[in-house]
Image (tube, helix red, strand yellow):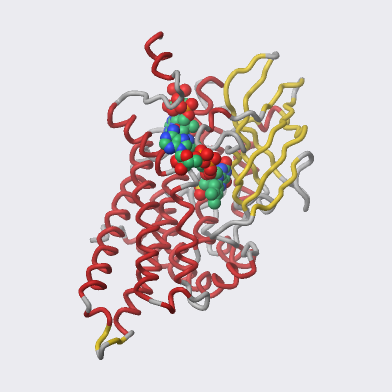
Amino acid sequence: MECLTEAERRLRDHAREVAQEAAAQAAETDRSEQYPWAMVRRMAEAGFMGLTIPKAMGGPGLSYFDAVLVIEEFSKACAVCGRIAVEANMGAVGAIMAYGSEAQKRIAAGLVLAGDKPAILITEPEAGSAATDMRTRAVKRGHEWVIDGDKTWITGGGVSRLHLVFARVIEDGEEKGIGGFIVARTGEGMPDGMTAERIPSMGLRGMPEANIALRGVVVKDDMVLRPPGGWARGFGRLMDAYNGQRVGAGTVALGLAAGAYGHALERAQCRRQFGRPIAEFQGLAWMLADMSIELEASRALIWRAARSAGPNGFPDRLAAAQAKVMAADMAIRVTNNALQVWGAAGYSRENPMERYVRDARMFAIAGGTAQVLRTQVAEQILGRKLPQTRDGFVRIAAD
Ligand SMILES: CC(C)(COP(=O)(O)OP(=O)(O)OC[C@H]1O[C@@H](n2cnc3c(N)ncnc32)[C@H](O)[C@@H]1OP(=O)(O)O)[C@@H](O)C(=O)NCCC(=O)NCCSC(=O)CCS(=O)O
Ligand SMILES: Cc1cc2nc3c(=O)[nH]c(=O)nc-3n(C[C@H](O)[C@H](O)[C@H](O)COP(=O)(O)OP(=O)(O)OC[C@H]3O[C@@H](n4cnc5c(N)ncnc54)[C@H](O)[C@@H]3O)c2cc1C
């Protein structure tokens, strides 16, 4: 029941083949907590970085659905590589390809096709779920902008070259809305005014997460990303693009859960207790059955969301949120049960099950928590805003 075209199947099989190399280095990447540079070079050579970059910009111009097929294969093998494939095809690069000037698109395409995984800087210490409370400011000064603020939990902070910084736009002394600012690293160090401090994390340890301080970062006017509709609608249009990354993050959750399930299925058939394979015990057989059902359901929602890319070229907001919530919650259950199938051996750091469990935990937090995304789903199906501030409904009533 795959319903893939011949080209899609070929792409998926190619990714599956290269992902075997990612599998071989996944344990060492986790142990060393080092970004897998060699594997990223391999992914770039094989054409998996910048799949969604249009042909006019030197990319293959593939779809979000094609990217999803690739991300799932890498995530089964090494979830860090899966996340790299997400940010090299969605999120910041998607926003720049949709809204950027020719020059901006060329810069982004050049970096990503050469192997860069861009970073998206939204979250702040006091503005996580409430991202619109961000305090980072970009103040217009002549033909340039000066950015000051603090971002946190920035994936790839310190290794990414291309940064898309979300900031409050201050023009003529007035606040206009939230916009995107492109900051690219040209030399070895961080861009002037930007510093990264690594945050030790539970899973996906080969991917640096960082606090990023922005102190007087200067961005030329031609590196400002101007989504259609003006600054007042800037955040919403940037989030349109971000829906692509939500689908990508859900795909990593799906892929790593599928990887853990594959190991559990094998183990259940070769491990024997009471003189027979443990798969014969109904308690485990039903656990495996539930895992397969949840995986197929998640894949169906992810594929539907990836294929939903509307006229703006991005996946549908409701479909993306539904798919991400389902995949994130599912991955926690499936990886945990897969470890259970392995018994004590699953608890050992000498096999990948405990890594899958740690790696799965982030997807119900990052990219919109499972709670916040449920509210987004509710808003879409009810067709009404559900304000989260205490005075939100009072304000709506007053309008
Ligand atoms: C959107 C929230 C921050 C809630 O904040 P507000 O209640 O202040 O905002 P809203 O009024 O709901 O929205 C403002 C504006 O944006 C539009 N919008 C919001 N979400 C979307 C969306 N998904 N798609 C399209 N448009 C969207 C909304 O319609 C309004 O537009 P107008 O002004 O009316 O035009 C909060 O709900 C939220 O999403 N919080 C989560 C923040 C988040 O996802 N952060 C991700 C950081 S990056 C990351 O984690 C990377 C991890 S990885 O990829 O693994
Ligand atoms: C591994 C990882 C990678 C990340 N990468 C990036 C990145 O590259 N770029 C970036 O900008 N950010 C990134 N983030 C940050 C991520 O987007 C935020 O962690 C997320 O949006 C939640 O914010 P918070 O952690 O501050 O939690 P909070 O917003 O403080 O939430 C704490 C708890 O309260 C709940 N909660 C909050 N508000 C509500 C509400 N209205 N209704 C119900 N429950 C609510 C949440 O669900 C959560 O359980 C990353 C985070 C992680 C863990």
- Total numbered badges shown on the rendered structure: 0
Q: Residue at x 52, y 55 (%)?
A: 83
- When the figure is inspected, residue 75 is found, relative to residue 210, above or below; the finding is below
- Return the x and y of residue 80 as percentages of the image width and height: 54, 60
Q: Is residue 358 above or below residue 126?
A: below
If the image is split into quadrants, where does the N terminus sit?
bottom left
Please report the residue visible at 64 percent of the width from the left and 33 percent of the height from the top: 181
Closer to the camera, 142 or 61?
A: 142
User: Is 67 located above or below residue 33 in the figure?
Assistant: above
Going by the image, does 374 lie left or right of 365? Answer: left
Which residue shows up at 35% across the image and 66% down it?
Answer: 337
User: Residue 383, image x and y in percent?
Assistant: 30, 25
**Residue at position x 75%, y 47% in the image:** 190
Q: Position of residue 293 (x, y in %)?
A: 25, 60
Q: Where is residue 209 shown, x and y percent of the image?
A: 62, 52
Tell me the quadrant of the picture where the C terminus can be found: top left
Q: Image quarter for residue 375?
A: top left
Q: Quadrant of residue 370?
A: top left
Does residue 129 appear anywhere in the picture? yes
- Frontmost residue, 180 versus 99: 180
Instruction: Please say whether residue 97 is visible from this viewpoint.
Output: no
Residue placed most toward the observer, 345 or 170: 345
Dividing the picture into quadrants, the one containing residue 8 is: bottom left
Q: Looking at this rendering, what residue extends furthest in the bottom direction?
A: 275
